[in-house]
Image: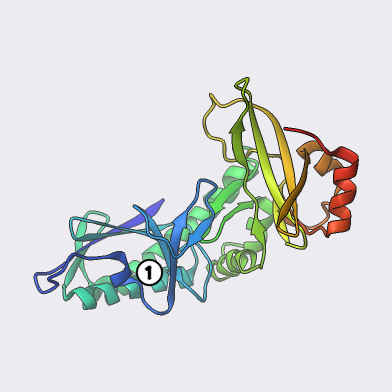
Amino acid sequence: MAVDVLIKSGGLFKKNINIKDIIFDDMRYGIMDDNYRLVENEIGKYTVVFYKEHLCRGYEVSVIDNTINLRMTLPTSDIDIDFFYDYIKRIMKRLKVKKFVRNDIVETIENIDLFKEEDKALSLDTLQIMLDDINSGKYREMYLFGVMNPIVVTNLELVDINNDLKKFGEFMHNKQKLDIYYAKAGIYKRNDGSLFGVYVLTENVKSVFPYEPGEFILNDDIVMDDWNISFVVDSKILGVISYSDFLREVKKDINYDSKHFIIELDSKKIEKLINKYKKDL
């Protein structure tokens, strides 16, 4: 569920609009990679922008034919919603326009406070629907795509959030503000045509890894033969072991969410794993 807004530049804004023209000092931006992780300070066909003091879900922005397209995905926090409409006001002021289109209806800024309340109510409804769907067995968990990386929620997190947008925002922000590396796998092909995946763990870097590899392979035609993890020590690849051996040997007692754990290994622990399980790809 999302709120879509279009803002067309007025005649007074002579030059073509660049996304950087509408990124303000209190904002950050970037694009999402194929694992839905933020690549900061890059502009793409669809760019993510967000309030730098609140790491929740942010907004997608693109510019087509000098029209700014904004999308805010729901549910989101009260802070994200308030900032979204304040952002619209600032864009309109910069472009010197009086109207915008919200969900295909032409609107003016006089109704913005009403829209904030509508979107907050819809976010609350959506959180309740998510909880109901999980409790009914329709889903085991759900992915929420944040401004930094995905976060998995179960009924435990949703019950704790208790249909409170402030708590939801705190939950999303606290997860994403952590100084961690959210690992992704590269997919490679051998000479015989078999496919293998490789995650990377660097010494003394706190990292997030999945309990089950390959979570974002959406193409059913891709069949992976094996998953592996390589280790970087002193900026060099020290060796590779199978992902199953990695999972069996390391402690996974710090959860990031229900599908991921946080781990940090020093060079001694890495060397021990490589000496025991090193393999060729």
The image quadrant of residue 136 is top right
Residue 73 position within the rendered picture, expressed as x and y whole percent measured from the top left = 43, 56
Q: Left of 7 or right of it: where is 142?
A: right
Residue lying at 86% horizontally and 41% vertically, measured from the top left: 248
Residue 80 position within the rendered picture, expressed as x and y whole percent measured from the top left = 45, 69
Front-most of residues 68 and 144: 68
Q: Left of 72 or right of it: where is 238?
A: right
Residue lying at 10% horizontally and 74% vertically, measured from the top left: 12
Q: Left of 5 or right of it: where is 54?
A: right
Amino acid at pointer 1: Phe
Q: Residue furthest top?
A: 192
Q: Is residue 16 visible?
A: yes
- In this picture, is 179 found above or below 75? below
Within 10 Å of the Cα at label 1, are there few (<14), some (14-19), or many (20+) other Cα atoms? many
- Look at the image and tell me in which quarter the C terminus lies: top right
Front-most of residues 99 and 217: 217
Rendered image coloring scheme: rainbow
Is label 1 in a helix, a strand or a loop? helix
Residue lying at 69% horizontally and 49% vertically, measured from the top left: 200
Give the labeled residue for mark 1: 84
Residue 11 position within the rendered picture, expressed as x and y whole percent measured from the top left = 9, 70
- In this picture, is 269 found above or below 193? below
Residue 95 position within the rendered picture, expressed as x and y whole percent measured from the top left = 19, 73
Q: Left of 51 or right of it: where is 233?
A: right
